[in-house]
Image (cartoon, helix red, strand yellow):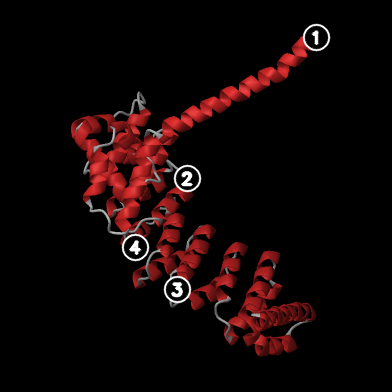
Amino acid sequence: MSEDSLLLLPLGALGLWLALFLITVVDHCVYQFTYGRFLTRLDDIERDAKHAQLGTSEPCAHMRSTRTRYLARYLAKAGSAEAPARTAAEVYLQRVGEAAVLKRAHDFNGRNLTRQITALYALARTGHPDVLPLLEESLASSQSVLAYAALNMLEICDSIESAEVLVRSLDSGVLPASRISTQLEHFGTELNALYISRLKHGDPKSRYWIAYLLGKSSYSLEAEEILSGLLSDSEAGVRKIALASLGFMGAPSLRARAKSMTADPVFFVRTQAVRLLAKFPELQVVRVLVSMLSDSNDAVQLAVKNALVAMGPSIQVFLDSARLEADVITAGQLDEVMSSIHSANRVGRNEVSHG
């Protein structure tokens, strides 16, 4: 390679860097003077509104004076603020026309996916009565972008009816159940009755996730009875999540249910029961836990030790009594537990004194 060629290499690299830099600068400037300006003005309006310097008509006026493509971009963004995004959707519907927006939302042929998603967002944000069947169809789409957008839009709808769509999708498996469950957790609508109704039907495919979601809902006697019934489910995973959900909702029967599940044939169900029993530093519970130090599974034994340590110094007298009756192996395990309790208590006292 000649010396001239060697000199051209760094010059070429510098030219490429300058070209990329100029493209970035131009792109930034275009953004700042177009869509970026729209967002900046919207932020100013919201900030002033908090200080009561502007009336409620200002956001509407801003949306009406904005270009349609900026409205479309804003209303179809999952992270857009709820109130201004709804206003943007209302203005968008007025400009484009309801019939045209519905036609775009029905276009499942993939000819213009972005336009279809924008139309669906406009309908969802304004609570259009025809949007839920469209979103349910979108959930089953082979286009993952459309399916996940529909998932977000169903949360925006935030109603019993939109939740029913998501619960049905748990059975069909159109999207990962964990993702659907997370979306349902974000709902502000009370869904306790819906979950109870679904569990009464005993659907084997989705009862794990619905039992989990029921535990995240408000407590009711009926919910407690449904979850307690699932403790004898044929699926170990369902038994475990039902017990955990009783703990989530603070069911009065939790202690008794957890004690009964320490005899479950599957180790991870027993482990869950042990973790929940850590909330009850009482003699009868400690006796149950101490007896489980000889469990056949190491994970259960470790969970028992952690539970006893978590109970703290208040169970010291119970452990001393249990040690006198224990065999050599169990006595050694109890010594470890008591040593850990003393260490944790000492550290806690030191932190308090330093504080």
Q: CA distance from mark 2 to mark 1?
A: 59 Å
For residue 2, which numbered disc appears in the image? 1
Give residue 182's position: percent from left, percent from top.
44, 53
The residue at which mark 2 appears reads as 176
| Amino acid type indicated by mark 2 | Pro
Q: Residue at x 66, y 77 (%)?
A: 309
Q: CA distance from mark 4 to mark 2?
A: 22 Å
- Mark 1 residue crowding within 10 angstroms, few (<14) / some (14–19) / many (20+): few
The residue at which mark 3 appears reads as 250
| Amino acid type indicated by mark 3 | Gly
Q: Residue at x 72, y 77 (%)?
A: 340
Left or right? Give the position of 79 relative to 55: right
Q: Secondary structure at mark 4?
A: helix
Q: Secondary structure at mark 3?
A: loop
If you read the primary sequence from the N terminus, does the residue marked by circle 4 or circle 2 appear first? 2
- Numbered label tally: 4
| Amino acid type indicated by mark 1 | Ser
Q: CA distance from mark 3 to mark 2?
A: 28 Å
For residue 192, which numbered disc appears in the image? 4
- In this rendering, the label closer to the viewer, 2 or 1: 1
If you read the primary sequence from the N terminus, does the residue marked by circle 3 or circle 1 appear first? 1
